[in-house]
Image: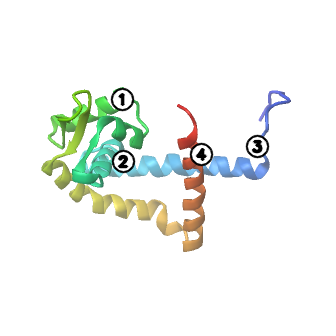
Amino acid sequence: MARISSSSTRWLTPLELRAWQAFVAVSTVVNAELEAELQAAHGMSMGEYGVLAVLSGAPDQRLRMTDLARLLHLSPSGLTRRLDLLVRHGLVAREACESDRRAVYAVLTPVGRGRLETAAPDHVTAVRRHLIDHLDEDQLRNLAESLEAVQAACDDEPV
């Protein structure tokens, strides 16, 4: 691989490159498999499942759109596009905030809750098959701690 010379660039060491390439390969393959299985079995994307899952864990199964977008790492317009389909299918509703006219809530509907409850066992089984079951407890702990450190650093960075 050709390197462009730059005195300010900290090139990856062999271990760092190995970790980066493994992360990209695994995340790409695992996400593609999970996406394909959810789509085939339940007619929903990982993004749609993610919205339903986040809302299911929220108080009263509702979140302000701005908070939901932040939790899903989506732009407001990206969340709007994703929610449009879920609203059309009756899985999520949009509700105005009574105390702040500018705010809108995304609310998990009973139909959406039912779809999530139907899909969740298959999704968890697939997550186990494609990732969790390949790691022992120490590896899982290290992976969780490592990725949480990266996530915390990303959350601290300005957008």
Name the residue located 43 percent from the left edge and 39 percent from the top edge. 73
Measured as percent of width and height from the top left, residue 145 is found at: 58, 60
Nearest-to-viewer mark from 3 and 2: 3
**Marked residue nearer the N-terminal end (4 or 2):** 2
Q: How crowded is mark 2: few (under 14 residues within 10 Å), some or many (20 or more)?
A: some
Q: Between 17 and 158, which is closer to the camera in this rendering?
A: 158
Q: Mark 2 points at which residue?
A: 36
Measured as percent of width and height from the top left, residue 108 is found at: 20, 47
Q: Between 87 and 4, which is closer to the camera in this rendering?
A: 87
Nearest-to-viewer mark from 3 and 1: 1
Kind of residue at disc 4: Ala
**Marked residue nearer the N-terminal end (1 or 4):** 1
Q: Mark 1 points at which residue?
A: 76
Secondary structure category for the residue under label 4: helix
Kind of residue at disc 1: Pro
Measured as percent of width and height from the top left, residue 91 is found at: 18, 44
Nearest-to-viewer mark from 1 and 2: 1
User: In the picture provided, is 110 more to the left or to the right than 85?
Assistant: left
